[in-house]
Image (cartoon, helix red, strand yellow):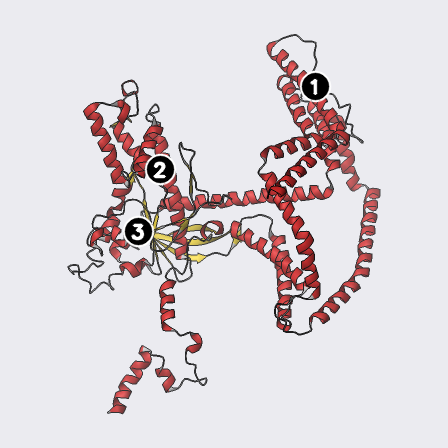
Amino acid sequence: MKKIKVIHILLTALLTAGFILLGVFVFGNSYMRLMETVKDLYTSIVFYGATLFYIPTGTSPTVNGYSGVLTWQGYLPDSADKIKEFFGTFFRLFIDKENFMLWADGVIRVLGVILEILVITLPVIVLIIVLIKRAYRKKNNNYNKDTVPLKIFKRIMRESILPAYNFIRGYADFIKDKRWVKICWLILWAGNLNVLSIAVAFFAYYFYFTVSFDMQSILIQTAKLIIDLQVAVKTIPVVLWVILGIYLWDRARKKIAINRLRHFEAKNCGFIKELSIASLACGSMGKKKTTFITDMALSQEVMFRQKALEIIQRTDILFPHFPWICFENEIKRCMAYGVIYNLASVKKWVGLKRKRFELRGDFKSQLYGYDGKRYGMSYNDNLKERNIFDILETYASAYFIYVLESSLIVSNYSVRTDNELISEGNFPVWALDFFGKRERNSRHSHILDFDTLRLGRKVLKENGNNVFEFGVVAITEIGKERGNNLELKDVKKDAKETNQKNDMFNSWLKMCRHSATVDNFPFIKVFCDEQRPESWGADARDLADVITIAKSGEHRLSLPCYTIEEMITEWVFNRVISFYYELRFLRGDNTLLTYLLKKAASVMFKRNERIYNRYGFSVLSLIKERGTMDGKKEKKRYFLMDGKIYSDRFSTDCFSDYFDDMGIKGKKGLRDYMEYLTSKASVKELKKQNSYFINSLYRGKDEEDSA
């Protein structure tokens, strides 16, 4: 490990020395030009100060003069008349007959060369394809054995290319951690490629222009900029310019795509804000009901954090001189020691501080040295007057919700979140962006104990005082848990066991906002889903907004200008896979051609899949109405972004372990089921169905036969 580090250091020193020598012997003109721009900057600053403060000086600005080091080997217009003449000549060439004929002659010559190449290479390509197909059609069962060409290729890769690749990667990681090396190299190449001169020249012209407003000089500066760019344009190969252009274009369009996704998320948040505290998503199987409520739960959790921060900021400004950071630190200590654990305990703790202050008037210990006599102990908002401890209670409640390092989602299925609290020991900040590149630690939603949502009888007696306060409640298949009026027909309210009629769940739903309200905002939301709205009892459903998923739209992409790349990827993938599985049918060994083709197709396929997973989205068409089912229906849209909702957020088969357990215990699979003997079921085979209908048909007949 130490040896490779020494090699990395020596290589860094050699590269740095090489860059310096290049600057001395190859890019010397760039540094001479830099000295010119430094002189221009000096004279411009002197001119700026002299003009601004009316100080006479014998120094005149030199920024409008052309360089004596770098010259343009051609023609550059430096006045308005010359620019007009230049563009006139340029556009006249488009309608000039002689120029058109010269262009057409050039095109014909290029096409002729291309045709000659095709005529020569096409038969060779066809012959190679035929030979490869004949060679690869030889059948064998050499399972997973490499052919001789593939063995040679793998050996070359293993002994030469891979070690070099690993060394380059290791050195890149070494340089990545050395920030000062990257800065030094950046400065060196900025000087070599004349970029430093351009930067200094910009400031030189800035100081000149801000006091002279010489509009004519802009033409000269444009010409000088083009001359200064010659060094970089001539030095950097065309291939690198193309690569740089593709990189910058790809980066720009990815930024556009991410901004579009964030815009969609903002629209989703607006839709969620319109909903009442409880909502019920409905739709047939496969309409993404659970996906929909999970997406809303994730967004609502973020909105609760943001709303808590907004309350903190508004409350802070009411007493701008209060030492809030000391108050926050005591809240965090109380949370660590278990003194503060919910909103009720926050109110109790602030109430105790208030009583101690009223008894002793101790500003130092209870208000952290706040000068209440000077800055005041109350706030009047023209509606009512509030004591500082009322403000502290609001602040503490919002701060508790904000800094709580726990998922705010409670659900009857698992939901993964990756929000992260970042802190330097002062005021913490949440990383809440669903579409950023930051790797974050995962946490999952809390297990929903339905007893916490019951104000009446509970399944476990020890849950007697445990009531849910604030957060996001997500319940899938709510109808199977709560039932509807018809299903609960025979359930009695005065029964000894806990049931849907005596647990007072509906009462909790009607009153849940009372325990979750901070500064008149309810920090609670209940999202449920079911196939039919009638599956949930009317008493509870009437409180909710019913959202029916009418249509799940096609998968789309927010990344612009990706169609051609996708078409190429799809074409290559389909051809390679078709060829690969044709060979798989005939051969069991591994060949060099299939190895290379499959590797190339894999790279393209993985890139395409990652693009769609990061920038893909679909649109749900929704119909929103009141739970009473008698109001006006509204058409809405909701955006499902792959990078947010499908990044291992939840499992669509959340109850599958129940069936897996039954399957293991049953010890039978599909092939163990009896098959029909003919194309028509016999009586014996019909009875094997254990069908209510078939059994009813034969029940009376069997009784007659037995009689």
Q: Looking at numbered disc 3 in the image, what kind of residue is underneath it?
A: Ala
Query: Looking at the rendering, which quadrant does residue 355 occupy?
Result: top left
**Residue 459 or residue 375, whichever sits in front:** 459
Residue 84 against residue 125 in the figure, above or below: above
Residue 337 against residue 693 in the figure, above or below: above
Left or right of 317? Residue 226 is: right
Q: Looking at numbered disc 2 in the image, what kind of residue is underneath it?
A: Ala
Query: Looking at the rendering, which quadrant does residue 254 occupy?
Result: top right
The answer to whether residue 635 is seen in the rendering is no
Q: Which residue is mark 1?
A: 39
Residue count near mark 3 (Cα–Cα under 10 Å), binned few <14, some 14–19, many ≥20: many
Residue 319 against residue 2 in the figure, above or below: above
Q: Residue at x 39, y 62 (%)?
A: 284
Q: Looking at numbered disc 1 in the image, what kind of residue is underneath it?
A: Lys
CA–CA distance in space, label 2 to label 3: 24 Å
Q: Nearer the viewer, mark 2 or mark 3?
A: 2
> In the displayed image of the protein, which residue is found farthest to the top?
56
For the residues labelled 3 and 1, say whether their Cβ atoms are less than 8 Å apart: no
Residue count near mark 2 (Cα–Cα under 10 Å), binned few <14, some 14–19, many ≥20: many
Left or right of 449? Residue 496 is: left
For the residues labelled 2 and 3, say whether their Cβ atoms are less than 8 Å apart: no
Left or right of 700? Residue 620 is: right
At mark 2, the secondary structure is helix
Q: Which residue is mark 2?
A: 308
CA–CA distance in space, label 1 to label 2: 55 Å
- Specify the label residue 544 is tagged with: 3
Mark before the other along the chain sequence, 3 or 1: 1
- Specify the label residue 704 is tagged with: none
